[in-house]
Amino acid sequence: MGSILTFLIILSVLIFVHELGHFLSAKKHGIKVEEFGFGYPPRIFGLNRGGTIYSLNLLPFGGFVRMLGEDQAQGGRSFYVQPKLTRLIVLLAGVTMNFLLGVVLFGAVYAKLGIPEPVDYLTVTLVASGSPAETAGIKVKDKITGFADTQAFIDYVNARRGEAISLEVNGRPLQAAPRLIEATPEGQGALGVGITNVDFVFYPVWQRPVRGVIYGTKEAWGWGREILSSIKTLVSRLARGEVPREVAGPVGIYEVSKSAGAQGFLAVLQFTGILSINLAILNLLPLPALDGGRVLFILIEIIRGKRVKPQLEQAVHLAGMLFLIGLMVLITINDVRRLFG
């Protein structure tokens, strides 16, 4: 039950933050919001404030915003009659909020863990079973001083295969004996140890939130590029009639959220940040029914100098929604097949 609850909370937060962006932007620009709901209907109860119904709904999956006149003019405060720039701002507010959520979550994680930066020592990340490193007593998270570059350490060790070498580990001398090439298992090095020259640096407490957000922004952009690259590969493979096994739907996301939950609160925050960036980018894709698809119709309106007929736009969005639902069903089937081998 705990992992299911974690999954529902993550999903709800992501969707709610997205819809909150649309809601706040619409309100700021004077657009009438008929309902702002937490969860999806059926409605449990609703409270009318300032002409907007704030509702609590039975299905706990995020929320929704229902604006007046989203598809056709229904008075001066309807979405449909707003200037093009206003409509673009409102449509893009959701993905903006998701991206900002990712930045904030990454910032919180790194403010707590420290900022990953190159340092003037090496940290042990892996020790192979039965390796010279294990025999010498080297453990994961040990610090090897005297080397600031991983390749320099590898070259030093490889040049002394079959000899006893002296290393400074955690401030004390330690002897190790790198293996000869013929005695080294495939995929391992002479010592059988993984190393990195990147470690979490702890700055003064008053600097950590700012540094965390700066690094979180870089992390968010990095994940954005990675996700775009993955989407390009996905589209290419779908065009060939393949559903890649590594693509995850709700079942796959649940499995990963369960794994993140087992690793602790910070892992859940980081996973939520990754998903938030993912949601922002997916919603920006120019596909019907997504925010990016609606933005595309406004761009077409700008180029043509007039609107696409509302009936045509609605039909395109409906077709897009059916396509996305079908794709999600295929991906979910793929998730289940992968889950049960």
Image: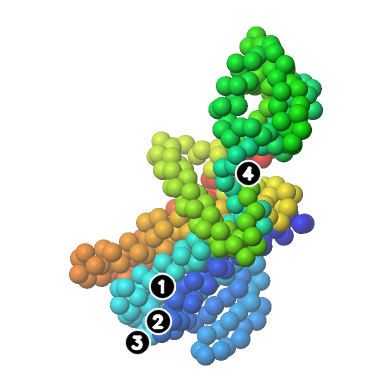
- Of badges 4 and 3, nearer the viewer stands 4
Which residue is label 2 attached to? 29
- Left or right placement of residue 273 versus residue 258 in this view: left
Tell whether label 1 touches label 2 (CB within 8 Å): yes
Q: How many marks?
A: 4
Whether residue 269 is visible here, answered yes or no, is no
Tag 4's secondary structure? strand
Tag 2's secondary structure? loop
Which residue is label 4 attached to? 199
Q: Amino acid at mark 3?
A: Gly
Tag 3's secondary structure? loop
Which residue is label 1 attached to? 90
Q: Is residue 239 above or below residue 178?
A: below
State which quadrant residue 155 falls in. top right
Mark 2, Cα crowd under 10 Å, few <14 / some 14-19 / many 20+, is some
Which residue is label 3 attached to? 76
Q: Give the spatial CA distance, label 3 vs label 1.
A: 16 Å
Residue nearest the viewer, comparing 9 with 172: 172
- Left or right placement of residue 119 versus residue 32 in this view: right
